[in-house]
Every structure is written in C-alpha cells, then in structure tokens.
Image (tube, rainbow, N blue to C red):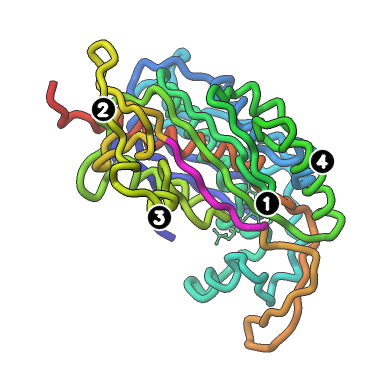
Amino acid sequence: MAGSTIGELFRVTTFGESHTSAGVGAIVDGCPAGIPLSEEDIQPDLDRRRPGQSRLTTQRKESDEVTIQSGVFRGETTGAPISLFIPNTDARPGAYEKFKDSYRPSHADYTYEAKYGVRDYHGGARASARATAADTAAGAIAKLIVPQVSFTAYVKQIYDIVADIPDDVTHDLVESSEVRCPDPFATERMVALIDLIKRRRDSVGGIIEMRISNVPPGLGEPAFDKYDADLAKAIKGIPAVKAVEFGLGFAAVRLLGSQHNDPFYMEGDRVRTRTNNSGGVQGGITNGEDVVLRAAIKPTPTIAHEQETVTNTGESTTVSGTGRHDVCVLPRAVPIFEARAAIITADHFLRNRSARI
Ligand SMILES: Cc1cc2nc3c(=O)[nH]c(=O)nc-3n(C[C@H](O)[C@H](O)[C@H](O)COP(=O)(O)O)c2cc1C
C-alpha cells in the first residue's frame, strides 16, 4: 500500500490500523537537528483530536499517549528519523463483524476490497480517522520548525448553521466551544442540531475554515509543487473531506477582475494587499497575507439507519452501523487540519532554498 508518505524534505510516513494493529505512528524524516523536543510538545494536539472528548463525539476511549522512540538525544532532535508511537488501548474489533462481508455505503469498504482483494474490516483499518492521530503527532513537530506561523482552524458551518467568524479569531475562542466554532451563538445551535441528529441515528457534515498567519512570502514551488496545491492535497486527504477552496474560492466566479483583484500597497517596507481574495497565495507562492482555506466535510458514512448495499459475493442486502461513531466529525478534524498544514508549511520552509537571497 503506497501513498503513506507526505513531504519532500520534511517527510512524514504514517502506519497503523484502527483496531487490529498495536497502535498507529509516524516516522518523521528530515527534521533539522537541535530542536528541543519531548512528548509534552506533541501531547496537547493529540488530546484535542482524540476520541471521547465530549458527549458529541465517538465514545471510543483512547488516551492517545505518544512516545518518541528515536531521533532525540538529551531533549533535542539529532537530525535522525524521529519515530512516534501511539498505542491502541480501546480497540474492539468484534464490533465490526457485520461489515465483514457487506460494504458500508460511502465508506472505503468496497474500494479497498476492489483494489487489494483483502480488507481488514475492523473499523475502517487504514481508512479510519484513527490513522490521523499519527499526522497530528507529526504536525506538532512541524510546528516547531515554523514557530512564527500560526495555524488556526475552526468549524464555520454545520449543515445549514453558518457561524459569524470574528477577524481576530484565537485558539482559546475556538477551544472554548464544544464544537470548535468561535461563534458562541452558532455553537449553541450546532450542539442542539448534533444532539437531534444523534437521536435520529443519522449524521451531519459541514465546513472547516483555516487561517494560516505569519507565513513568510515565497513558500511554494512552481509548477507542480505549489504551496496551495500541496496544501489542498494534504487537506483533501483527510477522511471525509470532499472539497477544498482558497480565498474566495468558488465565489470568485461571481466577481469581475476589477472586483476580485487584490490591490497592492506598501506598509513600511512590506508589500501588502488591500483585500485577500487570493487567500494568501498567488502563482502557487505565498504572498505574506494570511493563507485562508475552507473544506467541505461530508456526513459520517456509518449510520444506524438500514441502508441498501451488496455483499462481497454480489448479493443484495442491507447494512446498518453499530458501534462507536462520530455523528459529526468536524470538531475532531480541526486539529488534523492544523497538523497537516504545519507539515506542508514546514516542508516548503525547508525547501525554500531556490529563493533569491
Ligand atoms: C475525525 C474524524 C472522525 C471520523 N469518524 C468516523 C466514524 O466514526 N465513522 C465513520 O464511518 N467515518 C468516520 N470518519 C470518516 C471516514 O473515515 C471516511 O468517510 C472514510 O474513510 C471514507 O473516506 P472518504 O469519506 O474520504 O471517501 C471520520 C473522519 C474524521 C476526519
């Protein structure tokens, strides 16, 4: 199974399955030497992603305690590969027997079996969001390479409830919300909606927005390794993400060039733009304004409703989900967005050697 590695110079390879492996983890290669690093630098981000944080998320109880198994000497990175491991402590593979022969609609069951001919049907295995604990741990290391950059993701919309996002959104404000939405009024409505959807044994999706601030101008490589293209790939790779847009995104088609262009001006010796419809990236290279992206996330596929499906021998049947599932995955996806963005940003920061100096 190829495709478990991301990054060129800061290179992260993840491994592990949801229920049947001893745990999940990552090998982080290309991290510069001399960066102070311990488990305490990583654990807070894992605590924000882990299941069982609130009654609104899956009730799987994982402590997600990370250990650093290589690449650190006397509290500092050595430049050698850093190995991170997070054990599975609350795996219940038995809960997934009913998916052994039947494919859950819109999960990865059919496509994995069609491709590999063998499928670990326990909780989605590699397709499970459990694998993103490894990205989240690696992302915490990436953040230490670009400490000046801040990554702030938050829930902007759940179903038809759209939040009013303040210009000065902070991590504290996001974390004060049970659904990681920095609008207290929208939070109340979102919580009530998720409760209702949960009672109806259904699921719901929405939009996560992310602002990346203090990104230096000049990150990104033309033509195939544009900063926004790499970021889009990393974010689209998060399970359940169906679309990614930057700046005004799809709304740009309803503007004329004279309305959409971001006029330049000087702020001291810094080139700035009056508006940020581009979302901080032009020609695939960061311009120093906030990088702003939004991603659409679908409703969780495993639901308790009976749904039409087929078995792996081609018979028509129905399937309904049991076990512990997120009714709405967005609150737990927020730290995964920040981690993957940090990995891409740290990688481009280290790659930025062809720039004029
Ligand atoms: C944080 C998070 C938690 C998730 N939890 C569940 C879950 O409990 N049940 C489920 O069926 N899918 C869950 N998903 C989504 C599936 O992993 C995903 O839909 C599936 O792998 C198919 O991939 P795709 O939706 O990208 O096509 C979760 C996704 C994220 C980001």
Residue position marked by numbered label 3 in the rendering: 3
Give me the C-alpha separation between circle 1 and circle 2.
35 Å
Q: Earlier in the sequence, mark 1 or mark 2?
A: 1
Q: Nearer the viewer, mark 2 or mark 4?
A: 2
Hey, what amino acid is under mark 1?
Asp
Position above or below: 4 against 354: below
Q: Is residue 283 left or right of residue 71?
A: left
Give me the C-alpha separation between circle 1 and circle 4.
22 Å
Answer with the quarter of the image where residue 269 lies: top left
Residue at left offset 48%, top offset 40%: 26
The residues colored magenta run 292-299
- For this rendering, which residue is in front, 250 or 91? 250
Q: Position of residue 160 (x, y in %)?
A: 68, 51
Q: Nearer the viewer, mark 1 or mark 2?
A: 2
Q: Earlier in the sequence, mark 1 or mark 4?
A: 4
Residue position marked by numbered label 1 in the rendering: 160
Q: Earlier in the sequence, mark 2 or mark 4?
A: 4
Q: Position of residue 331 (x, y in %)?
A: 66, 40
- The reply to whether callout 1 and callout 4 are in contact (CB within 8 Å) is no
Give me the C-alpha separation between circle 2 and circle 3.
40 Å
Q: Earlier in the sequence, mark 1 or mark 3?
A: 3
Residue position marked by numbered label 2 in the rendering: 264
Q: Nearer the viewer, mark 1 or mark 4?
A: 1
Q: Nearer the viewer, mark 3 or mark 4?
A: 4
Residue position marked by numbered label 4 in the rendering: 55
SS at mark 2 in the image:
strand
- For this rendering, which residue is in front, 351 or 70? 351
Hey, what amino acid is under mark 4?
Arg
Rendered-image quadrant of the C terminus: top left
